[in-house]
Image (cartoon, rainbow, N blue to C red):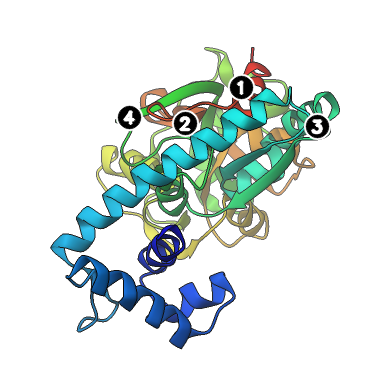
Amino acid sequence: MFQGMRYVYEVYKEMSFSRAAKNLYISQPSLSTAVKKVEDRIGFPIFDRSTSPIQLTELGREYIRAAETILDVENGFRSYVDDLSGMRNGSLTIGATNLFVSYFLPPLLARFIQKYPLIRIDLVEGTTAALAEKLVSGELDILADYTIPDKEGFGRAFLFQERLLLAVPENFSCNDKVKNYAFTPAAVKKDVHLTSRVPPVSLEFFREEPFLLLHQGNDTRQRAEKLCQNSRFFPNIRLELEQQITAYHLTSSGMGISFVSDKLIKQMPEDPGVIFYKLDPKVSVREAAFYYRRNRYMSRSVSEFLNLLH
């Protein structure tokens, strides 16, 4: 019964029999047969196979809700058993975007591993939307991000606060109009932009320039569009990208203007080819956090990891 349920759930996650079969390391005909057996047992189809991609039927949606409840119970019990071992075994699965995995999580992970070397850590990279779904389904214990699409039912542990800055190629002529607002990468590392001496700039001065934005659905993209909207223009988008670090490197090559985290800039070598500007703090200031499911058992490995934040 439970094996068939896991097969159905994998098809649901992928909305594809072929991709699910690949993930499960079985053939597609075998997976189709296993799912059909489940459907025959309950007497109704779980998937509508007439659409592309396939979709859940009304009963299928109820089946998935029940499956997630069962998987939550199973995962919670497994975590409870692991806790009885006194952190001598167990696991911790963390989801995060590439930015977090590359620059912000390594110090925390190193401290945790040093303290609990027997706990297995799995890192899952992806987009915010995809990772949020994995958190809901129980595939992740915690998710590091700025926000998640639906915060209801989730707890939150504060990680850090940061500001988005406007990064502009040094050779763009628009810089001549706003010299009093500009500052260097070295100034970012000294937190000069956090003082009242540096005022926020209006994006009105940059409206004719090309922008490098992240893809839709990303928190940085949403804030960038809001800042442009507040200056009453829609940006001329030269490129849409997956990663903030890629946008910054392209800015340093003179390709266009990007929105980058001050915490990221502090991790990077100083680039004299980029000039920075402070943005409206009501939009540019944001908090990063670890999100977790409130209604499921919190294992000791999760609680000990979150305790590192204090």
Task: Please state which of residues 255 and 13 is positioned toward the viewer in this rendering.
Answer: 13
Marks counted in the figure total: 4
> From the viewer's perspective, is 111 left or right of 162?
right
Q: Residues within 10 Å of mark 4 (few under 14, many from 20)?
A: few
* Quadrant where the image shows the C terminus: top right
Q: Amino acid at mark 4?
A: Gly
Q: Amino acid at mark 3?
A: Ile
Q: Taking the image as drawn, is residue 145 in sight? A: no
The Cα atoms of the two marked residues, 4 and 3, are separated by 29 Å
Task: Give the labeled residue for mark 2.
Answer: 292
The Cα atoms of the two marked residues, 2 and 1, are separated by 10 Å
> From the viewer's perspective, is 117 left or right of 7?
right
The Cα atoms of the two marked residues, 2 and 3, are separated by 20 Å
**Pointer 1 with pointer 4, Cβ within 8 A:** no
Q: Residues within 10 Å of mark 3 (few under 14, many from 20)?
A: some
Q: Would you identify the image quadrant in which residue 102 lies?
A: top right
Q: Would you identify the image quadrant in which residue 294 lies?
A: top left
